[in-house]
Amino acid sequence: MTGQDSDQSLPWYKDGLRFQCTECGKCCTGSSSFVWVDEEEIAAMADFLHISVAAFKIKYIRRRDNRYALVEKKSQNNACIFLKDKKCLVYKARPKQCSTFPWWNELLKSEESWRFAAQSCEGINDSAPLVPYSQIVQLGSTT
Ligand code: SF4
Ligand code: SF4
């Protein structure tokens, strides 16, 4: 494979994308989707909060479609249970779904989907720092 061929096989964001989180908290609020978590992520958050996994599940987890999701605060525009004053109370142990945003496959699949994501995430904008492709690959997920 030539260098040119390999460059052509790179995705549309091969030159990087502009993003910097402003910590506005919007992506932790009002979403129509859930924050899905698995047993490993639950254990990590329980450990971070110094409570048992059983206690964590009772307080912070709801079963949905046979999966685990973080509880939302209905009275506060469906904000995540861990969002307080725009800060994540479990930031260092936050689930992969959160730590990999906005580098999700579904948002990176086209320029159009990336532009759509920018409508609800103010961190995606032309004046934000350029995140290089290599870093996007590293930060991304299979979500
Ligand atoms: S919506 Fe975007 S800028 Fe706001 S907290 Fe989420 S990732 Fe950061
Ligand atoms: S766990 Fe933290 S980062 Fe994830 S949605 Fe809740 S508040 Fe936001």
Image: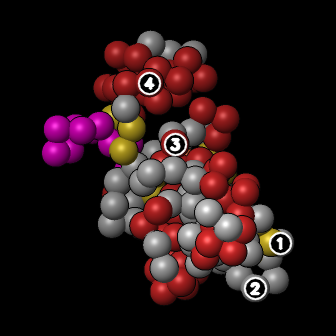
Q: Is residue 113 visible?
A: yes
**In the rendered image, the vertical position of residue 66 relative to residue 79, given as above or below:** above
Judging by the rendered image, the residue that carries numbered circle 1 is 129
Mark 2 vs 4, N-terminal side: 4
Q: Residues within 10 Å of mark 1 (few under 14, many from 20)?
A: some
Q: Residue at x 20, y 44 (%)?
A: 64
* Mark 3 or mark 2, earlier in chain: 3
**Which percent across, then down, holds residue 25?**
60, 62
Q: Quadrant of residue 63?
A: top left
Q: Residue furthest front?
A: 1
Task: Write down the region rendered in magenta.
Answer: 62-73
Give me the C-alpha separation between circle 1 and circle 3: 23 Å
Residue type pointed to by label 2:
Asp
Find disc 2 in the rendering and name its residue: 126
Quarter holding the C terminus is: bottom left
Distance from disc 4 to disc 3, alpha carbons, whole Å, reads 10 Å
Q: Is residue 84 in sight in this rendering?
A: no
Q: CA distance from mark 2 to mark 1?
A: 8 Å
| Residue 96, disc | 3
First in sequence, mark 1 or 3: give its number: 3
Vertical arrangement, residue 3 with respect to residue 68, above or below = below
Element class at badge 1? loop
**Kind of residue indicated by mark 4:** Glu
Q: Residue beneath label 4, please?
A: 40
